[in-house]
Structure formats: structure tokens, C-alpha cells
């Protein structure tokens, strides 16, 4: 199964990740939704951030969001970020609900003894969970991602992914490519998140 090959990729990437002091630090627990893109509003079509189908409130009723309402790594509300959330299901029957690919790959990297048998991700348009390994991913574009400056969105339908690219840029990618991109972006994204958190703390203190 490709899940096992992904774990090997995560192992190699983790070795690179922890070799740098700047990269070895993971984001601290969040307060609110400060890390990365705000959850898009919910009405109409599926391609823009302000006119996506479905809603965060509806997604909060999904079983995976009920079981994992917030991301263990950053604390973000998975219902509000249903369009980017991920669910890892492991061989031992346990599961892990993350807010984004950024947090999911960190979990896979540090939990190498737990092999995922299923990796699910929220469809960018419908917010329904789909198979991350079979999804049509869009890498990049003019929209900021969740917990990452470079967006990484998943679509069940290729036409929807291509429509997004037409409207916002980016390129089609498979799951292996976005996993690699997530680790490549980790140092810059971690720095960005920490700076935002520092700014928010300073604002709250003033």
C-alpha cells in the first residue's frame, strides 16, 4: 500500500527536518485561528474562499470532527477548517485528526511506529473527506494555505481542481508531491507561524 511508502518518505524527511534547529521546533498550541488562512465562508460555488459550497458549521457535525474537534498539534478548530482537515487511521485502530497537511505530515513523521492504513483529507469544495492518495491536489496559487504560505488543496474531481487553477493559479500534483512540498516548506512555515503568534501576543498585551 502507498501508505507504507509514504511513511518511508516521512522518515527521510523527518531526518532532514530535525537536523536543523530552526526546523526542529513545531508550532505551539494556537489560540483561535491565527495560523494560516482563515476558514472560507460558505455559500455558492466551490472555487473561491468566500463562495465555497458547504459550511464549517455543517462540517462540525461530521463524525471525524466530533471525534477530533481540534488539531492536537496547533489547537485549530477542524470544523472551521474542514476544507483542509485531514484524518489518519492507523493499523492499531486509532486515528488522528489534523487541521491541515502541515500538521498531518508532522504526526506521520514523529509516529513512525504507527502505519496509516487510510489517509483522508477534506475536499476543498465540498468539505467531505476523500482519499488523500487518490485526490487531485493543487499545489500553490494566489491563495495562502492553512498553516502554510504555499497552499495545498485536495479535490475529488479533477475538473474542480482545474477550475481552481484557472481562477487562482497553482498546478496539479499527486499526494507524494504535496507531502514532499509540505516538508520543503516546513522551516519557512514554522517561522511564519511563530512570528504571527508573537505579533498576536504583543497585540493582546497592549
Image (cartoon, rainbow, N blue to C red):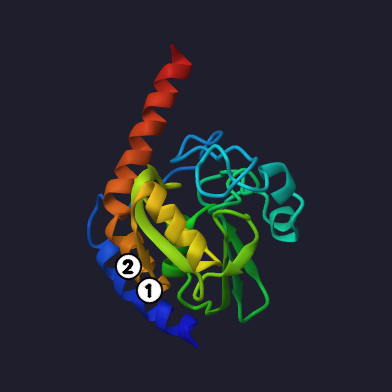
Percent of width and height locating residue 193: 38, 40
* Residue 148 visible at all: no
Q: Residues within 10 Å of mark 1 (few under 14, many from 20)?
A: some
Q: Tell which residue pokes out farthest to the top in this image.
A: 206
Disc 1: which residue = 176
**Secondary structure type for disc 2:** helix
Vertical side of 201 occupied by 173: above or below = below
Residue under circle 2?
180
| Contact? badges 1 and 2 (CB < 8 Å) | yes
Q: Tell me residue 67's x, y (percent).
A: 72, 57
Q: Quadrant of the C terminus?
A: top left
Within 10 Å of disc 2 (Cα), the crowding (few <14, some 14-19, many 20+) is: some
Q: Quadrant of residue 196?
A: top left
Q: From this viewpoint, which residue is outermost toward the left?
A: 20
Q: Looking at the image, is 75 positioned above or below residue 158?
A: above
Q: Where residue 131 sits in the image (x, y, percent)?
A: 57, 72
Residue beneath the point at 45% across and 15% down: 205
**Could you tell me which residue is drawn at 30 percent across and 69 percent down?**
13
* Residue 114 percent coordinates (x, y): 53, 77
Is disc 1 placed on a helix, strand or loop?
A: helix
Amino acid at each position: 500500500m502507498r501508505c507504507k511508502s509514504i511513511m518511508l518518505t516521512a522518515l527521510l524527511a523527518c531526518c532532514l527536518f530535525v537536523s536543523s534547529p530552526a526546523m526542529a521546533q513545531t508550532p505551539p498550541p494556537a489560540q483561535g485561528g491565527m495560523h494560516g488562512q482563515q476558514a472560507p465562508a460558505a455559500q455558492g460555488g466551490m472555487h473561491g474562499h468566500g463562495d465555497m459550497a458547504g459550511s464549517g458549521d455543517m462540517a462540525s457535525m461530521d463524525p471525524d470532527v466530533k471525534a477530533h474537534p481540534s488539531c492536537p498539534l496547533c489547537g485549530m478548530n477542524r470544523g472551521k477548517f474542514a476544507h483542509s482537515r485531514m484524518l489518519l487511521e492507523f493499523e492499531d485502530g486509532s486515528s488522528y485528526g489534523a487541521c491541515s497537511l502541515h500538521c498531518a505530515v508532522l504526526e506521520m513523521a514523529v509516529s513512525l511506529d504507527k502505519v496509516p492504513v487510510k489517509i483522508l483529507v477534506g475536499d476543498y469544495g465540498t468539505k467531505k473527506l476523500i482519499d488523500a492518495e487518490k485526490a487531485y491536489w493543487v499545489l500553490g496559487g494566489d491563495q495562502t494555505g492553512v498553516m502554510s504560505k504555499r497552499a495545498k488543496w485536495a479535490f475529488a474531481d479533477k475538473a474542480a481542481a482545474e477550475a481552481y487553477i484557472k481562477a487562482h493559479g497553482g498546478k496539479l500534483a499527486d499526494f507524494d508531491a504535496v507531502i514532499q512540498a509540505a516538508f520543503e516548506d516546513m522551516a519557512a512555515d514554522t517561522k511564519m507561524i511563530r512570528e504571527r503568534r508573537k505579533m498576536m501576543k504583543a497585540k493582546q498585551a497592549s
